[in-house]
Image (cartoon, helix red, strand yellow):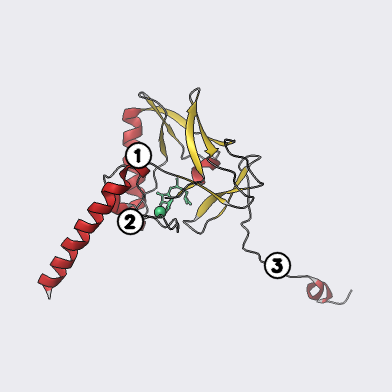
């Protein structure tokens, strides 16, 4: 075969928008997210109420979780991206999901989630909250409270997005806080001119 022939024959792979899904479980895998870096995606159509993947990691007591959580937050802060992988298991223990074998840690937050987490017999599961189509990104409500809300801008892209990552029960209050904050900013800007 003449030099170069093979290259000419090689066909460029069609680059569809679909994510290249890796690892994960039989239901979901890790791919490139439009929301933030890595995300979790449906490998196939998933019926509502399916336990899609377990959130695994190291089981640690609360004090250690507090320490590691602050450390993870500090590490990400210079990049404006303090990713914390602590998950509340019960009153005594948390799960530190910052381990290689925890693919569930890649799931992003959305203000309009298609999944939820549930603790069943001391195991944390990511469960479909509705029927999910193959290749949809799996997203759930992180449930953050209102402390440090400005540190967590939300890019979920949903029409229901409130602009920051907070739990559903805090969104009404957050909207008021945002209004008050914007008013204050505007006043400061006026004063500065
Ligand atoms: C547990 S990680 C999720 C996986 C993450 N995308 C990654 O590549 O590591 C949580 C972090 O992802 C980012 N993230 C998740 N959901 C987001 C959203 N809706 N908008 C903006 N950033 C988000 C934030 O930086 C958050 O601290
Ligand atoms: Zn959002």
Please report the residue visible at 61 percent of the width from the left and 46 percent of the height from the top. Answer: 29
Relative depth, front residue between 69 and 167:
167
Q: N-terminal of the two: label 3 or label 2? A: 3
State which tag comes first along the sequence, 1 or 3: 3
Q: Which residue is mark 3?
A: 14
* Disc 2 crowd, CA 10 A, few/some/many (<14, 14-19, 20+): few
Q: Is residue 62 above or below residue 173?
A: above
62 relative to 186 in the view: left or right? right
Viewer-side residue, 2 vs 38: 38
* SS for callout 1: helix
Could you tell me which quadrant the C terminus lies in?
A: bottom left
Q: Residue at x 18, y 62 (%)?
A: 183
Relative side of 9 to 169, left or right: right
Q: Position of residue 14 (x, y in %)?
A: 70, 67
Q: Which residue is mark 2?
A: 78
Whole-percent x, y for residue 62 in the image = 34, 28
The extreme right residue here reads: 1
Is the residue 111 above or below the residue 16 in the image? above
Residue 18 rendering spot, x and y as whole percentages: 63, 59
Residue where numbered disc 1 is placed: 69
Secondary structure, mark 3, is loop
Query: Are the two marked residues, 1 and 2, in contact with CB atoms closer than 8 angstroms?
Result: no
The extreme left residue here reads: 191
* Left or right, 86 with reference to 128: left
Q: Nearer the viewer, mark 3 or mark 2?
A: 3
- Give residue 36's position: percent from left, percent from top: 46, 56
Q: Is residue 94 left or right of residue 173?
A: right
Q: Earlier in the sequence, mark 1 or mark 2?
A: 1
Q: CA distance from mark 3 to mark 2?
A: 37 Å
Q: CA distance from mark 1 to mark 3?
A: 41 Å
Q: Tell me what residue is drawn at x 49 percent, y 56 percent.
A: 37
């Amino acid at each position: 075969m003449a030099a170069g022939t093979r290259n000419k024959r090689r066909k460029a792979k069609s680059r569809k928008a679909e994510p290249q899904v890796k690892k994960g479980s039989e239901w979901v895998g890790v791919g490139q997210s439009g929301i933030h870096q890595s995300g979790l995606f449906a490998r196939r159509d998933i019926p509502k109420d399916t336990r899609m993947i377990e959130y695994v990691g190291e089981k640690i007591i609360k004090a250690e979780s507090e320490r590691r959580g602050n450390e993870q937050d500090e590490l990400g802060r210079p990049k404006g991206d303090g990713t914390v992988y602590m998950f509340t298991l019960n009153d005594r223990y948390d799960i530190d999901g910052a381990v290689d074998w925890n693919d569930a840690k890649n799931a992003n937050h959305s203000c309009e989630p298609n999944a939820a987490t549930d603790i069943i017999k001391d195991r944390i599961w990511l469960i479909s909250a509705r029927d999910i189509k193959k290749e949809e990104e799996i997203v759930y409500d992180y449930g953050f409270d209102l402390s440090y809300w400005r540190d967590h801008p939300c890019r979920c892209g949903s029409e229901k997005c409130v602009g920051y990552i907070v739990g559903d029960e805090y969104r009404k209050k957050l909207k008021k806080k945002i209004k008050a904050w914007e008013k204050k900013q505007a006043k400061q800007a006026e004063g500065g001119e």
